[in-house]
Image: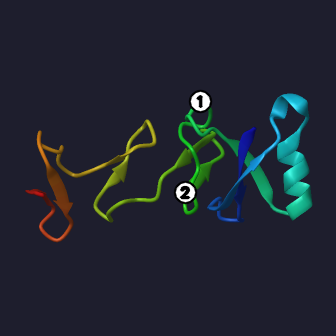
Amino acid sequence: MAHYAFINEQNIVTEVIVGRDETEGDWETYYGNLREQRCVRTSYNGNIRKQYAGIGYTYDETADVFIAPQPFPSWTLNAHHDWQPPTPKPDGDYVWNEETQDWVPS
């Protein structure tokens, strides 16, 4: 079994399905043609394309990775395609407060 992400014109994942393993054929093309939508394989264990695609994720075709939705407007994407807060998270149980732009105890 393999997993496949359907991607809209803005490279946003709209659906993820379980399908046939690509060792048995070109299933990205098959599923894409079947739905008339772009289809890209994703890996449940993150072996390909950085991480498992979810609805709302973006597919970066140049880097060939799936990128999670931006968690907060102040966070930026680093060179490894991971969202980073403006300040590093301290050790312990903290949550990000977008209004104060700081970590607060949870």
Residue at 77% in and 52% down: 39
Secondary structure of residue under mark 2: loop
Using the rendered view, name the quadrant where residue 64 is placed: top right
Give the image location of residue 66, x and y in percent. 57, 46
Mark earlier in primary sequence (1, 2): 1
Q: Nearer the viewer, mark 1 or mark 2?
A: 1
Which dot marks residue 47?
A: 1
Amino acid at pointer 2: Tyr
Residue at 62% in and 61% down: 12
Secondary structure of residue under mark 1: loop
Amino acid at pointer 1: Asn
| Residue closest to the eye, 2 or 81 | 2
Give the image location of residue 4, x and y in percent. 72, 48
The quadrant the N terminus occupies is top right
Q: Residue furthest left?
A: 105
Near mark 1 (Cα within 10 A), the count class, few <14, some 14-19 or many ≥20, is few
Using the rendered view, name the quadrant where residue 74 is placed: bottom left
Which dot marks residue 57?
A: 2
Q: Residue furthest bottom?
A: 99
Q: Where 5 sits versus 65, above or below?
A: below
